[in-house]
């Protein structure tokens, strides 16, 4: 014989999960506040990435323009680009 508590547990196991009805043709959009903050964050990181790329190019220009040993600069640049590739290959 089942106790009342076990009966409730067994009864609840047989119920299908409660689902909300959604229109499959309409994707659910996040609330406007979330959408706005996500957009702002995307623009912020876009600006950061552009800044990093710009300062890298300025650094390369300075290294090549103001250094007499341009071959050494190109070798160091090639070594810096090849090092991560070699580390990933290991």
Image: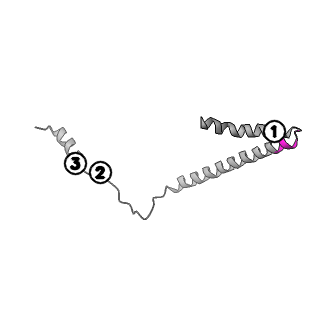
Q: Quadrant of the C terminus?
A: top right
Residue 21: where, in percent of width, then height?
A: 35, 59
Q: Label for residue 73?
A: 1
Residue 4: where, in percent of width, then height?
A: 16, 39
Q: Please identify the quarter of the rendering in which residue 68 is found.
A: top right
Residue appearing at x 33%, y 54% in the figure: 19
Instruction: Say which of 62 and 29 sits in front.
Output: 62
Residue appearing at x 35%, y 56% in the figure: 20
Magenta-drawn stretch contains 3 = no
Label 1 element class: helix
Q: Is residue 15 left or right of residue 23?
A: left
**Total of numbered circles in the picture?**
3
Residue appearing at x 69%, y 50% in the figure: 47
For label 3, the residue is 14
Label 2 element class: loop
Distance between the alpha carbons at the discs numbered 3 and 1: 72 Å
Residue 15: where, in percent of width, then height?
A: 24, 50
Of labels 3 and 1, the one closer to you: 1
Q: Residues within 10 Å of mark 1 (few under 14, many from 20)?
A: some
Q: Is residue 41 left or right of residue 29?
A: right
Residue appearing at x 68%, y 36% in the figure: 83
Distance between the alpha carbons at the discs numbered 2 and 3: 9 Å
Q: Please identify the quarter of the rendering in which residue 77 is found.
A: top right
Sequence-wise, the earlier of marks 1 and 2 is: 2
Sequence-wise, the earlier of marks 3 and 1 is: 3
Q: Residues within 10 Å of mark 2 (few under 14, many from 20)?
A: few
Label 3 element class: loop
> What span is in magenta?
61-67
For label 2, the residue is 17
């Amino acid at each position: 014989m089942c106790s009342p508590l076990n009966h409730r547990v067994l009864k609840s196991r047989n119920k299908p999960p409660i689902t909300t009805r959604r229109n499959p043709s309409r994707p659910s959009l996040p609330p406007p506040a979330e959408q706005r903050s996500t957009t702002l964050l995307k623009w912020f990181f876009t600006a950061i990435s552009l800044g990093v790329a710009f300062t890298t190019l300025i650094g390369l220009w300075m290294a090549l323009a103001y250094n007499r040993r341009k071959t050494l600069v190109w070798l160091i640049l090639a070594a810096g680009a090849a090092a991560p590739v070699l580390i990933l290959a290991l």
